[in-house]
Image (cartoon, rainbow, N blue to C red):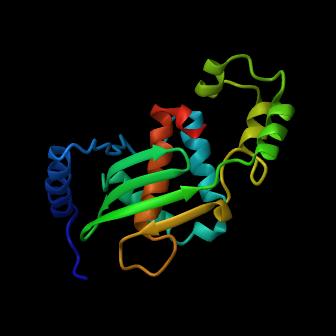
Amino acid sequence: RPYVPVAERRRKAQRETAKLAKKGKVIRPIQIEGRAIAHTFWGKAWCENLESYMDYANRLPRGRTYVRNGSVVHLDVKPGEIEAMVSGSELYQVRISIVSVVKSKWKALCQECAGGIGSLVELLQGRLSDRVMDVITRKGTGLFPAPAEIKLKCSCPDWADMCKHVAAVLYGVGARLDQRPELLF
């Protein structure tokens, strides 16, 4: 497809999302200030987990560019599902399903962290002991999903499971966790 400048993509996306808003859909865009996608512990930890999986390495740089330039025009996090719209040569629909943490894994995390969490407020602010943070964010056994626990779907014509639009949405989740860390739980 021919290249569409970012400014034109934004105008087109704004028109489309305005139509949806008139029909009653709540639009929740991702807006990145500066170069850093995430600023808080939870947002940074989400992005670091995402970048730790080599399965995603070839698509993540384009996704970072897309989220930084405002292409994630809507992102809604629900239990087990992320719904988004990303502005590209068209407005693409992205759906990401994430398997809930199995009870045995959750119990193991709770047991390992027992006594290390002072309050729910500290948990949400990411102000926990290094030991607890290591347990919660540990690759494989921590709270963040592994690639096998994530199902990716985008309406774009790219054949890859993770296209740049999906990558942008996954980074957008990190930015959203900055504002609302409770969405992780």
Q: Nearer the viewer, residue 10 or 35?
A: 10
Report whether 25 appears left or right of 173.
Answer: left
Residue 54 against residue 176 in the figure, above or below: below
Residue 12 against residue 101 in the figure, above or below: below
Write the residue at 59% across / 35% down: 41
Write the residue at 83% across / 21% down: 115
Where on the picture, by quarter, is residue 154? bottom left
Total numbered circles: 0
Q: Position of residue 44 (x, y in %)?
A: 57, 42
Q: Position of residue 83 (x, y in %)?
A: 41, 53
Q: Position of residue 127 (x, y in %)?
A: 66, 24
Residue 78 against residue 180 in the figure, above or below: below
Q: Nearer the viewer, residue 25 or 43?
A: 25
Q: Position of residue 30 (x, y in %)?
A: 35, 45
Report whether 6 appears left or right of 62.
Answer: left
Where on the picture, by quarter, is residue 92? bottom left
Quadrant position of the C terminus in the picture: top right
Q: Nearer the viewer, residue 1 or 28?
A: 28
Quadrant position of the N terminus in the picture: bottom left
Query: Do we see residue 36 in this rendering?
Result: no
Report whether 133 appears left or right of 82.
Answer: right
Query: Do we see residue 127 in this rendering?
Result: yes
Write the residue at 66% across / 58% down: 52
Where on the picture, by quarter, is residue 66? bottom left
